[in-house]
Image: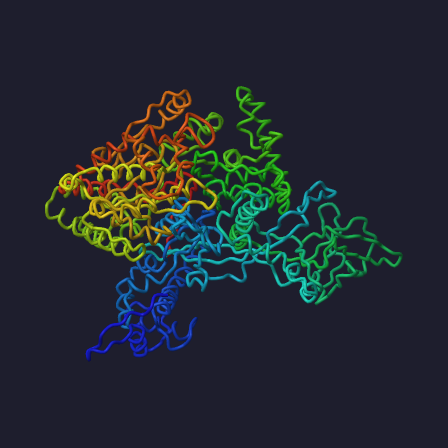
């Protein structure tokens, strides 16, 4: 925590802000006022939480303590709206969407919550009364480390829009303790350390101790006499729910993001082994459970890594979907047994209870591995079914003696305790609860009340898990279970990159999830049969479109194929991306199910990404449009076009942008020690570090620019456009070339920023540990943003939308959502360069054939990098990826060399445009004015109407 600042008092002495705030808080009465609206009442409620919901030593009210008390005060109101929302949904019984995603990049919750609740002013004034500034308190919050890139941020924007549009929906994810990693930049490059967002606790989440469900791994499949199948044995961990409230903008509707945490119970701790000194063995299941939600995307180079990733995915799906648990097996020494046993005689369709016995606190010793209980039975039944706490018992042996006494012996298979508990879990629980209260129901109605959306292939296992639950637990036949599943589940594809289209080893799947592999095999078999009987023209395509790739060298399960075959709708996330899916990746499936495929161009929430992160610009927009309704109806921004050349409007626009640039400059100085000039062109590229996103193209362009500046005279430099180039993003720990790019950027920055001849005209800065809160500073202060991926490789991108919305101009390729952004804001306001998606295959082929001729500027930039101008680090392995015509890690697969000359030409056009301030401001205004299409409200409205078939359910 930063030290308290010191301010002079009226007598000239100094007092710390901590002392001032402590004195101020003592003057405010600590009174619980959870729904407070007036500043005085809000201050009392904050002080109440500081004193009676304490997390720190008493008599302290420093910024950190003030943050937690403020968050809990805001949460009071959220919980009230939360409960009202849940009760309203329960009463109205609407169809509800459940959004499954491995990532959520929420960002800070405090600013968003008080903004959506429209209580910023009250909380700002209340904190002033308590001796603090709202801006300082907001900075105390750590970003929730629940995601990495655009996939997670999109999911969070979607939740905001679902709540704002009053749609019945919930999100589901995992509660990662250490996130992906916190990025630290050293002389060696990127260093990864664990995130610490839960080092203390998160005040926004509410643990639901009554929502705990079992999730099984490993084990085996038992076949019952009637042919039904049951997954038994293995390890069972518990899924504990943590709920995070998601408020809508100026509406009562507050929905949930439910995060699952994996844990083991006290029964799974072997006290005997612990006391025997075998500490690790005593808590093996506890350790394995903690690993599941420890880290986002753990390394998967080893089989253990693959198992852990697969565990994470199944854990999310099973905890979210399942509703009835099996007999729980544990490793305890003593344990309670069934609390109630019922013996039923089946006679035709009539069931007769022959005997019933309630049992209290019966125990069994681990050494005996069995338990005997006697029943007196009237008559001479020939067939029994035994139910334990309403669950049919599968491990039983029955004997009938001459005195008509039934002896029941329960056998425990290498297990020393069994507890049978029926629990009803989330998605199914809600369906059953509402139906049981209102009327009788059938499983065929399930898809009319439940929509499950898979955010990419990570939650694919929801498909076989739902099938398993319907067949094995509810007794549905295959056809009925398949009908329910395929009408419930929809799939969003986010990539065409081969490495991102998940393929899981069949051997790993069989080991971890044997019952699910049986189901996947059957889905695949039936799909193949369907093709061979109805689409003989596609038989030759079966090796590529079937689900199981049975290549003997590497048999895998193709998760994207499983999603497409099993979902009722499949969508891409930008028009170009969807066109590529339909024309190339999923073309054969499109010929089978042409109506299954849709486009849903991504969007962003205008609340977080303009209204709250750039208040000056937002106020100007509201002033000139004479309404603030644009915050929820972003199409209204088109009204700014008529003011694009208005001198007064341009002056106000310029002033707001400069305020954002100055804030950003202060942040950069504080975080990196680099002083940047707000009068220079702020040029920013922030996104996950990947070769296809081409940060390498950007830094090579910066290197060429630096070399040319060095060659200029002092007078020549004065005629150039001063530029500050900022990078940000994380490289996966095992992605070597991405980490080399991070190091190159930092090495270039070290040299350029300390060069007195050039550093007035060029700065290169790497912003460490890029996350949502950092983006909220970078994006409002940006003037040019680089979205320069190889055409056809970026599904959509959403940061391009955030930059455009904030009046930032884009230099980019015709890739992802760039295509639609350019159409909306006007071609003349977009700096276009590079090959198009349909040209890329031909250009790669020409490169393989040795026909590529590099531009001299490209060669010059590479050679300057190799010259040692930026230090002694060997960059040849990185630059070698740009050399040669073919081969692994060579041949310039991402076309950096081909696009370099047109990229540099586009950068020259940027420099010229920036010199004409009126022209640049007009282009900036038109960028914002044309961004109305890219609201996540529009995207979610389309999902709701065209995929989920859900409607508004507004809390009155």
Give coordinates of residue 37: x percent, y percent.
30, 67
Image check: 323 left or right of 169? right
In the image, 753 versus 126, the foreground residue is 753
Q: Quadrant of residue 245?
A: bottom left
Would you place residue 458 above or below residue 35 in this image?
Answer: above
Give coordinates of residue 720: x percent, y percent.
17, 40
- Which image quadrant: the N terminus? bottom left
Instruction: Answer yes or no: is residue 905 visible.
Output: yes
In the image, 184 versus 946, the foreground residue is 184
Instruction: Answer yes or no: is residue 636 visible.
Output: no
In the image, 515 versus 64, the foreground residue is 64
Image check: 19 left or right of 845? left
Would you place residue 276 above or below residue 624 in this image?
Answer: below
- Which image quadrant: the C terminus? bottom left
Give coordinates of residue 922: x percent, y percent.
16, 41
Q: Residue furthest left?
A: 647
Give coordinates of residue 549: x percent, y percent.
58, 31
State how the image is colored: rainbow
In the image, 559 versus 877, the foreground residue is 877
Q: Quadrant of residue 335?
A: bottom right
Q: Residue at x 49, y 62 (%)?
A: 207
Labels in figure, total: 0
Q: Residue at x 52, y 46 (%)?
A: 299
Q: Residue furthest right?
A: 402
Would you place residue 518 above or below residue 627 in this image?
Answer: above
């Amino acid at each position: 925590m930063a030290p308290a600042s010191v301010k002079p008092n009226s007598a000239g002495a100094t007092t710390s802000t901590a002392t001032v705030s402590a004195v101020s808080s003592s003057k405010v009465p600590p009174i619980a006022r959870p729904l407070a609206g007036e500043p005085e009442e809000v201050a009392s409620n904050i002080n109440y939480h500081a004193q009676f919901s304490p997390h720190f030593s008493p008599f302290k009210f420093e910024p950190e303590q003030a943050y937690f008390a403020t968050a809990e005060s805001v949460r009071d109101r959220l919980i009230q709206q939360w409960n009202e929302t849940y009760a309203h949904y329960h009463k109205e019984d609407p169809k509800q969407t459940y959004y499954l995603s491995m990532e959520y990049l929420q960002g800070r919750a405090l600013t968003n919550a008080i903004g959506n609740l429209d209580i910023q002013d009250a909380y700002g004034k209340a904190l002033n009364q308590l001796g603090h500034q709202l801006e300082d308190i907001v900075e105390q919050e750590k970003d929730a480390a629940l995601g990495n890139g655009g996939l997670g941020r999109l999911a969070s924007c979607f939740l905001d829009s679902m709540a704002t549009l009053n749609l019945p929906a919930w999100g589901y994810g995992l509660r990662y303790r250490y996130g992906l990693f916190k990025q630290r930049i050293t002389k060696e490059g990127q260093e990864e350390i664990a995130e610490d967002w839960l080092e203390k606790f998160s005040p926004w989440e509410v643990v639901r101790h009554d929502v705990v469900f079992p999730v099984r791994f490993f084990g085996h499949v038992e076949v019952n006499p009637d042919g039904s199948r049951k997954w038994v044995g293995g390890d069972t961990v518990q899924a504990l729910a943590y709920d995070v409230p998601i408020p809508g903008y100026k509406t009562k509707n507050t929905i949930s993001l439910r995060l699952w945490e994996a844990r083991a119970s006290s029964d799974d701790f072997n006290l005997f082994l612990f006391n025997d000194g075998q500490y690790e063995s005593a808590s093996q299941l506890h350790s394995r459970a903690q690993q599941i939600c420890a880290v986002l995307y753990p390394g998967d180079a080893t089989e253990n890594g693959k198992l852990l990733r697969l565990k994470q995915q199944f854990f999310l799906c099973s905890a979210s979907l399942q509703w009835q648990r099996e007999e729980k097996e544990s490793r305890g020494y003593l344990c309670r047994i069934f609390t109630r046993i019922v013996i039923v005689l089946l006679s035709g369709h009539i069931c007769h209870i022959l005997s019933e016995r309630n049992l209290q606190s019966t125990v069994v010793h681990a050494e005996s591995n069995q338990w005997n209980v006697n029943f007196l039975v009237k008559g001479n039944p020939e067939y029994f079914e035994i139910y334990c706490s309403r669950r049919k018992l599968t491990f039983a042996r029955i004997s009938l003696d001459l005195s008509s006494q039934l002896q029941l012996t329960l056998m425990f298979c290498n297990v020393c305790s069994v507890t049978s508990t029926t629990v009803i879990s989330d998605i199914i629980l809600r369906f059953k609860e509402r139906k049981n209260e209102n009327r009788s129901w059938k499983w065929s109605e399930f898809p009319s009340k439940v929509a499950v959306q898979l955010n990419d292939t990570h939650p694919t296992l929801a498909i076989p898990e739902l099938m398993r639950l319907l067949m094995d637990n509810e007794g549905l036949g295959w056809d009925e279970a398949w009908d329910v599943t395929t009408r419930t589940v929809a799939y969003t594809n986010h990539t065409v990159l081969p490495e991102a289209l998940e393929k899981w080893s069949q051997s790993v799947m069989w080991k971890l999830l044997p019952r699910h592999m049986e189901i996947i095999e059957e889905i695949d078999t039936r799909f193949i049969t369907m093709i061979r009987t109805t689409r003989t023209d596609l038989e030759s395509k079966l090796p590529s479109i079937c689900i199981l790739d049975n290549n003997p060298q590497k048999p895998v399960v193709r998760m994207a194929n499983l999603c497409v075959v099993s979902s009722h709708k499949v969508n891409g996330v930008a028009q170009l991306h969807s066109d590529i899916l339909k024309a190339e990746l999923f073309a054969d499936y499109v010929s089978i199910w042409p109506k299954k495929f849709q486009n849903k161009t991504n969007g962003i929430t205008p609340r977080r990404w303009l209204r709250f992160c750039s208040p000056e610009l937002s106020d100007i927009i509201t002033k000139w449009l004479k309404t603030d309704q644009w915050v929820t109806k972003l199409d209204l921004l088109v009204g700014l076009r008529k003011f694009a050349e208005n001198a007064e409007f341009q002056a106000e626009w310029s002033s707001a942008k400069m305020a954002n640039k100055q804030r950003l400059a202060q942040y950069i100085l504080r975080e990196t020690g680099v002083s940047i000039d707000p009068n220079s062109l702020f040029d920013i590229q922030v996104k996950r570090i990947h070769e296809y996103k081409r940060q390498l193209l950007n830094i090579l362009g910066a290197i060429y620019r630096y070399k040319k500046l060095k060659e200029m005279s002092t007078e020549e430099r004065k005629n150039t456009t001063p530029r500050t180039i900022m990078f940000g993003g994380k490289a996966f720990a095992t992605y070597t070339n991405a980490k080399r790019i991070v190091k190159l950027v930092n090495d270039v920055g070290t040299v350029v920023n300390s060069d007195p001849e050039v550093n007035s005209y060029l700065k290169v800065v790497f912003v460490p540990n890029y996350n949502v809160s950092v983006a909220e500073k970078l994006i409002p202060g940006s003037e040019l943003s680089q979205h320069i991926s190889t055409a056809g490789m970026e599904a959509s991108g959403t940061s391009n939308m955030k930059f455009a919305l904030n009046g930032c101009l884009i230099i980019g390729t015709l890739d992802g959502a760039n295509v639609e952004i350019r159409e909306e804001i006007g071609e003349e306001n977009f700096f276009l360069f590079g090959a198009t998606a349909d040209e890329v295959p031909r250009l790669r082929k020409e490169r393989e054939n040795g026909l590529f001729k590099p531009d001299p500027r490209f060669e010059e930039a590479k050679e300057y990098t190799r010259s040692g101008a930026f230090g002694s680090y060997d960059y040849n392995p990185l630059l070698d990826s740009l050399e040669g015509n073919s081969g692994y890690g060579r041949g310039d697969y991402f076309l950096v060399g081909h696009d370099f000359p047109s990229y540099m030409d586009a950068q020259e056009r940027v420099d010229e445009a920036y010199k004409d301030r009126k022209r640049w401001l007009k282009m900036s205004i038109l960028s914002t004015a044309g961004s109305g299409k890219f609201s996540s409200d529009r995207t979610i409205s389309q999902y709701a109407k065209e995929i989920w078939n859900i409607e508004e359910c507004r809390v009155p």
